[in-house]
Every structure is written in structure tokens, then in C-alpha cells.
Amino acid sequence: MKRIYGTIFKELRLNKGYSIKEISDTEVSKATISKFEHGAAMISIDKFFRLLSNINVSPGEFTLYVEERLDIPYSFSSATNNFSAFQDKQKNLVKVEKTIKRLEDQIQKFPERKFLRIQIINLKAIISQAIPDYKDKIDARDRQVIKQHLLVTKNWNDFELRIYCSTIHLFDLATIELLTHKLLNPFNYRLITPDIKWMMSVALVNLTDALLIRGAEDLTESTPYFKQIIRYLEDHPIPNKHIAEKAFVKFNIGSHYYLINQTERGLEDMREVIQGLSLLGCDEWANALILEFEKLTKTSYLEL
């Protein structure tokens, strides 16, 4: 275990106002903690987790502190934030491409490490959400790797959900159907944590985004999938605490209604979402959806 872990742990302990005596117990002695903090001793993973619990810091939170200090992404999630949400896309493009280059260098040394290739493809997919031309860097073989991984993995966790969210727009409708069946199947998850529930809501946003793109090409193909999602949401509504995801899914469904000539219903759903976001002070989101609204309806939002 690197010395930096002990250093950061000490900083967090002091920040929380705990003494070594307060967090020591029969499992982890004061001497062990002191040596760990000064890089003079390693501790087992179970003792490390126990110490984090004693200072009320989660393993995920600790990982973020380490990443910030070393500027190296250890956790998959740190490298898979939604690229399209970044305000400074050019700056973050450089950062993500730097991560891709680092992973590509690793896979040159260890070509058998499938997980590296999956992470590389995933990062390219994230970039392609913001820069559509980047999709050209993801070939059919790459897509097959992702598809195969998601289909054969018995139980999805945060890793698989993030991959689904970032890559679903790359696939044809037949593949989308297969992957979405797994997404919505409760038996596909060994443990449904709060993070899993949130990521499932995010996945529904990205899924409806992807279906709208397909619908622009052929409504007859995308409509059955929208019907399936609408039926699913009747029995499994997105939790209110996931209000952003709930709003975006409703807007996308409203867009679909508009496209299939249920014009008034579609306009009502889209307007409700935009107005709601404006009332909440989410002007950036509201303005982005107004642009989508005007692009779809070819009418000024203020005129309707």
C-alpha cells in the first residue's frame, strides 16, 4: 500500500477532529495506525476499511482524494463522467484522451487484459456523445466487445451500467433491445444499491436519447421500444429524488409523442419539463431543452 494512502488518511482523520486513540480498537492498535500514517507499515484491506469507517469516510470518497492528489484515475467512475455535461469540452477532451493514451500504452504491454480495452472503448464512446464524429474511432469489433461483455455478465453493477449509458447510442435497435432487457430485469443485479438505482434512471435518459435518434431515421422501428418504456415506467416510475433524469425522460417521451403526431400531448409534456426546470432555477438545462424543442418543432418556444 502506497505511503500516500497513510498520509491522506491522516489528513482526513485530523480534518474530522479524531485522535488516533479515538479510532483505535482491539482490531487496529494505536501503534499500527501511527505506522500506517507515516508509511512505516502496511495494513490489511479489512483493517483499512475498518479505519475508514471509524472516521466516517467511505472507500469511494477516499479513492477520490487519492485520485485528486496523484492526478491518476483509480476508480472507473472517475474516468466515465458524462462528457457531454462538461462545460469546458476542449479541456476535458484533452484530459480524457490522456487517459485513453495511458490505457492504450498498458494494453500494448498486457494485450490479454480485456478490461483495459473495455475502458478504452467506453471512454471513446463518452467523447462521441459530445463530438459525434468521434464515433468513427469505434469500429464494429469494439462494439462487439462491449455488447458481448454486457450480455454475458451475469450480474451488472455500477461498471456495466456506466458502459450501457455511454455506449447505447452506438448500437442498432436489435442490440438495444437485448441490452435494455438486461437493464430493466431486476434479476440482473445481485444488489440494487442507491447508486445502481440512480444509474438505471440515467440509463433511461440515454436510452430514450438513442431511440429518438433512431426515430428520426424510422419512426416505425423506434415506436415499439418507446411503448415498452412507457409501460415500464407506469409500473416502475423514476424516483422523485432523481428529478433531473425524470425530467429528461419525460421530455424525450414528449418528443416522441410529437413525432408520431400526438402533437398536443407531446407539446404539453415538453413545455411542462421546460417550465419546471425554469421554476427550479435550472436555466442551463431549460435553455438546452428549449433549443431541442425549437429544433424538433421548427417553431420558437415563445410563440407556443
Image: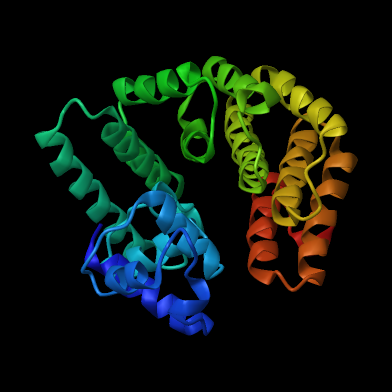
> Which residue is at the front of the view, 278 or 109?
109
Residue that extends furthest to the left in the rendered view of this protein: 109
Q: Residue at x 39, y 68 (%)?
A: 65
Which part of the image, by quadrant, shows the N terminus?
A: bottom left
> Which residue is at the front of the view, 136 or 246?
246
The answer to whether 104 appears left or right of 212 in the picture is left
The answer to whether 103 appears left or right of 125 in the picture is left
> Residue 273: image x %, image y %?
80, 55
Q: Is residue 185 visible?
A: no
Image height check: is 274 above or below 256? below
Image height check: is 10 above or below 191? below
The answer to whether 252 appears left or right of 141 in the picture is right
Counting labels gives 0
Coloring applied to the structure: rainbow
Which part of the image, by quadrant, shows the C terminus?
A: bottom right
**Residue 289, image quadrant:** bottom right
Q: Residue at x 14, y 32 (%)?
A: 110
> Residue 229: image x %, image y %?
75, 28
> Residue 213: image x %, image y %?
58, 34
Residue that extends furthest to the front in the rendered view of this protein: 26
Image height check: is 36 above or below 174? below
Q: Residue at x 64, y 39 (%)?
A: 200
The answer to whether 192 appears left or right of 40 in the picture is right
Q: Residue at x 56, y 68 (%)?
A: 56
Q: Is residue 52 visible?
A: yes
**Residue 179, image quadrant:** top right
> Which residue is at the front of the view, 43 or 109?
43
> Residue 210: image x %, image y %?
58, 34
